[in-house]
Amino acid sequence: MTSLEEELARVKPSGETFLTVGVFDGVHRGHRHLLDLLKRQAARAGCVPGVVTFRNHPVTVLRPEAPVRLITTVEERVRLLQELGIETVAPITFTLDVSRVTAREFVAMLQRYLRMCGMVVGPDFALGHNREGTPQVLRGVGTELGFTVAVASPYDDGGIRVSSTATRNALAAGDIATASNLLGRSYALQGEVVHGEGRGGSLLGYPTANVAVDHDLLLPGDGIYATWFHVDSQRYQAATSIGTRPTFGLGERTVEAFLLDFRGDLYQKTVRLEFVERLRDEVAFDTAEALKRQIEIDVRETRRVLGAAA
């Protein structure tokens, strides 16, 4: 049994499935358009709706010189899909061996291990070796092997393509409004609070929570953001900085959140940052005192933005 078969065999659907396959990074509005069709087709056939999602982006294997940072971790992707009513979610790992599996072999595995009775795909979909499994090819294979194939209509927003790439581009530019619109929800990231260099509290009077984020995730562009900080089922206003802290010399990119009206120990807690608005660019200040004065302004702006958004 191959590693792909082993991953599929771990999933135990409660019945026959109607499936779609893809990365589904971000689970954005375009994905939801396709998933709505999937759920309708599954209900009509008396099957369970399911998604086969890749843990890693295929581009990182096929073109490692052009790595793709993800919008969501696989754990968050599974959660979002399940919240949308997708009963069966099968995360699989894309490898060079998987890239060599033919379309026919792949769908036969889906039938064998996930009890697939039908598929829903996008108009530009293709799977299998050399992307041979186009919707037309899959329909032919389905006729032979005994499953149906439905093709979702294209989806856009006023002529703008809703895609994971468009969402990544918006995030990289710090355009939280566009990214959240494409996602259909507030953009957020999750991580564990770790120890930083301690300047926030001792030097500036603004102690920050340093959030360690999965290294495969794409961070929003450098800048200061008004965010909601979720921890222990509570929500706090926070001014969050993403960048290299140029006032103190360039370093690694970090995510640091100053929680308004909070006192307590957050170390080693898993937290979630929900981004609402970008306040300004990251700037190198001449002195720590000048930076402190700007942080005071950032805190006031955070209160204003989140007060209006609450």
Image (spheres, rainbow, N blue to C red):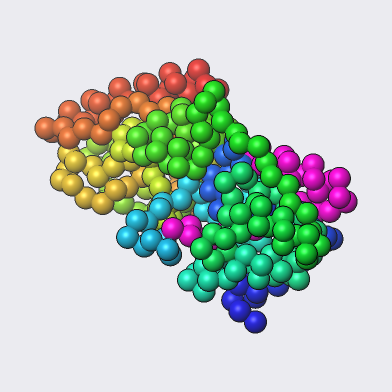
Quadrant location, the N terminus = bottom right
Q: Is residue 124 above or below residue 99?
A: above
Tell me where residue 193 appears, x and y as whole percent: 43, 51
Judged left or right of residue 304, residue 285 is left
Q: Residue furthest bottom?
A: 1
Residue 226 appears in the picture as rendered: no
Q: Is residue 213 above or below residue 155?
A: below
Q: Is residue 106 above or below residue 265?
A: below
- Number of numbered discs: 0
The residue sitting at 48% across, 60% down in the picture is 58
Judged left or right of residue 83, residue 189 is left
235 or 94: which is nearer to us?
A: 94
Q: Is residue 164 magenta?
A: no
The residue sitting at 25% across, 26% down in the picture is 294
Tell me where residue 31 appears, x and y as whole percent: 61, 42
The residue sitting at 78% across, 65% down in the picture is 145
Q: Is residue 260 above or below residue 100?
A: above
The residue sitting at 51% across, 39% down in the picture is 163
259 or 185: which is nearer to us?
A: 185
Q: Residue furthest left?
A: 286
Judged left or right of residue 188, residue 37 is right
Residue 27 appears in the picture as rendered: yes
Quadrant location, the C terminus = top right
The quadrant where residue 183 appears: top right
Tell me where residue 277 appears, x and y as whole percent: 42, 27
Residue range highlighted in magenta: 32-59
Q: Is residue 36 magenta?
A: yes
